[in-house]
Amino acid sequence: METSHFTPSGERAASIFIVDDDEPVRDSTCALLESHGMPVFAYASADALLRTAVLKHGDCLILDNHMPGMTGVELVEELRAKGIRIPVIMFTGRGDGALKQRAMRAGVLIVLDKPVNEEHLLQAIAVAKMASDDLH
């Protein structure tokens, strides 16, 4: 059963998918977004997301790049190859220029360096929401 979540202004809140193998980061990101009324679905790996999530157009994907198995950039490349168009915000603790360029070429909308500032994340989600509206 899906629950509808609405922002304080009465708009439907987009579902946010979070993929991060670092449990404390994943949990704190979920808690922050849920405190702002956003429905959040969290996964510990790219494989877990691919196996269980139904990604919809208009949702936002927040992911870490450096994870065991498939990296965040590789996940975005796979989603794009499958035709899944979802705005992506990527976290990285090792964000050199080459990684950021590859991420942007793959379709990542915004790359945020860890530790992620809460206000920057909320602003990035607002940008992702506008991008998702443009996809429709």
Image (cartoon, rainbow, N blue to C red):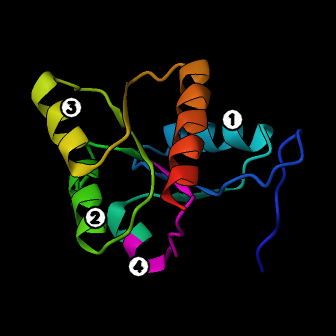
Tell me if residue 55 is in the magenta stretch.
Answer: yes
Q: Amino acid at mark 4?
A: Arg
Q: What's the CA distance linking mark 2 and mark 1?
A: 28 Å
Q: Earlier in the sequence, mark 3 or mark 2?
A: 2
> How far from the left and from the top, in percent, is residue 12?
79, 55
Image spot of residue 129 (x, y percent): 59, 45
Identify the residue under disc 3: 100
Q: CA distance from mark 3 to mark 4?
A: 26 Å
Q: Which residue is mark 4?
A: 51
Q: Residue at x 32, y 44 (%)?
A: 108
Viewer-nearest of discs 3 and 4: 3
Image-quadrant location for residue 34: top right
Residue 92 magenta-highlighted: no
Q: In terms of secondary structure, where does tag 1 sit?
A: helix
* N-term mark: 4 or 1: 1
Residue appearing at x 54%, y 69% in the figure: 56
Mark 4 or 2, closer to the camera: 2
Q: Quadrant of the C terminus?
A: bottom right
Disc 2 secondary structure class: helix
**Image position of 31 (left or right of 94):** right
Q: Please state which of the two labelled residues, at mark 2 or mark 1, is closer to the viewer.
A: 2
